[in-house]
Image (spheres, rainbow, N blue to C red):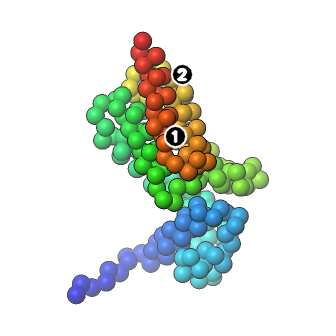
Amino acid sequence: MSPVPVSDDPVREVRERLLDAAEKVFYARGIQAVGMDRLRTASGVPLKRIYQLYSCKDDVVCAFLRRRHDRMMGAIAGYVARAEGPEQRVFALFDWLYDWFGEPDFRGCAWMNAFGELGPTNAAVAAEVHRHKDAFRELLTGTVRDAGYPAVVADAVYLLVEGAVVAAQLRRDAEPAHEARRGAEILLRAARG
């Protein structure tokens, strides 16, 4: 029998367990519907320990959004990088969306959900939302520009992606990714022509 691995950083281990639980319950139920007691139950981390790690619920929300951002951006960039050629990388964006939309727990954009719940009344959460959306837009538009298309086309493709995310959440199916991809194909063909 193998020894049970012991974390070199128990604080990091507890923090990760808490953020795993926070991501799951905030994304599934909404931020306002989840209190600190629910986080305690979901994570198995005592309330006192949670408050040692994060001074308030808003800090947990920001930490979960930051971590989700890093994971999501890395996943998209890795997926797109595997595509053959610059134009195929543009289309890979929509293939990634299709896979994401098809996940059983897909509930739309975590940042727009957070912004919709907390709006401009929470500056720290709003800052995380803007940071993510700026980076997401730059990744998408940069992929289109790297394929040789002008900024106006890149901006239009970005809006197709954002619209597909909303449509997929409302319709509860992955098909908006294919519909948006067809729109992008039309845009790129027109820009080439």
* Three-letter amino acid code of the residue under disc 1: Pro
Q: Can residue 78 be seen in this view?
A: yes
Does residue 129 show up?
no
**Residue that lies at the very extreme toward the bottom in this rendered image:** 1
Q: Is mark 1 on a helix, strand or loop?
A: helix
In the rendering, at what x and y percent does residue 55 appear? 66, 70
Q: Is residue 166 left or right of residue 86?
A: right
Q: On the rendered structure, is 63 left or right of 94?
A: right
Which residue lies at the image location 45% right of the left edge and 74% below the top edge?
13
Of residues 124 and 190, the one drawn nearer to the viewer in this rendering: 190
Give the total of numbered labels: 2
Between 165 and 119, the residue placed more toward the observer is: 165
Task: Give the quadrant of the C terminus.
Answer: top left
Q: How far apart are marks 1 and 2 (CA)?
A: 22 Å
For mark 1, what is the residue?
176
Quadrant containing the N terminus in the rendered view: bottom left
Nearer the camera: disc 1 or disc 2: 1
Q: Residue at x 65, y 62 (%)?
A: 30
Q: In which quarter of the image is residue 162?
A: top right
The residue to which callout 2 is attached is: 152
Where residue 99 sits in the image (x, y, percent)? 42, 49
Q: In the rendered structure, which amino acid carries the disc numbered 2?
A: Val
User: For the residue carrying disc 2, how many other residues have a C-alpha within 10 Å: few (<14), some (14-19), or many (20+)?
Assistant: few
Relative vertical location of residue 193 with respect to residue 168 in this rendering, above or below: above
- Picture coordinates of residue 52 (x, y %)? 61, 76
